[in-house]
Amino acid sequence: MQVREVPRESKEYLDVAVDGPVDVVTLQVEMQVRLYPLRPDPVGWKTAQWGTDEDGQTVAQILIGPGSDFDLSAAPGTYVPYVRITASPEIPVIEGRPVKIS
């Protein structure tokens, strides 16, 4: 699996592809970004937003970098994004592609 690399000074959206029904974008989406190999923290979820990538794939996205909820600039390393979708009664958690903060 290819790891995306982001300079610690950069503030940008981190995307995670989400497969599901067309109406998935009407559901509440949250994300967190955790230092590998840590798993999601029950209280670490932040509101994310829906978008599409350059291929038209539905993605969950959240800002990372200085001044964001996930300012990883002081602790470079490999991080894993997690997406949580509230689709009552299901609440799936999706693990995204790792990102290396350099």
Image (cartoon, rainbow, N blue to C red):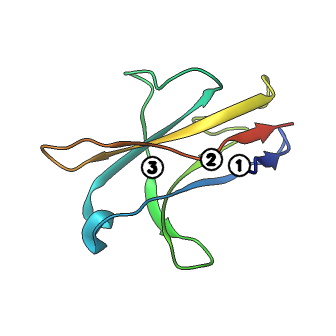
The answer to whether one can see residue 72 in this image is no
Place of residue 96 in the rendered image (x, y in percent of width and height, measured from the top left): 55, 46
Residue appearing at x 59%, y 79% in the figure: 55
Residue appearing at x 79%, y 28% in the figure: 77
Nearer to me, 97 or 102: 97
The answer to whether one can see residue 36 in this image is yes
Residue ID for mark 1: 1
Q: Nearer the viewer, mark 1 or mark 3?
A: 1
Q: Secondary structure at mark 1?
A: loop
Residue appearing at x 65%, y 25% in the figure: 35
CB contact under 8 Å: marks 1 and 2: yes
Q: Which mark is residue 50?
A: none
Residue ID for mark 3: 48
The amino acid at mark 3 is Ala
Residue appearing at x 45%, y 49% in the figure: 48
The amino acid at mark 2 is Arg
Q: Secondary structure at mark 3?
A: loop
* CA distance for labels 1 and 2: 8 Å
Nearer to me, 46 or 6: 6
Place of residue 18 in the rendered image (x, y in percent of width and height, measured from the top left): 44, 59
Say which label, 3 or 2, has the lower sequence index: 3
Nearer to me, 71 or 3: 3
* Vertical order, 38 against 84 (above or below): above
Say which label, 1 or 3, has the lower sequence index: 1
* CA distance for labels 1 and 3: 24 Å
Q: Secondary structure at mark 2?
A: loop
Say which label, 1 or 2, has the lower sequence index: 1
CB contact under 8 Å: marks 3 and 2: no
Q: Is residue 57 left or right of residue 6?
A: left
The amino acid at mark 1 is Met
Q: Which mark is residue 97?
A: 2
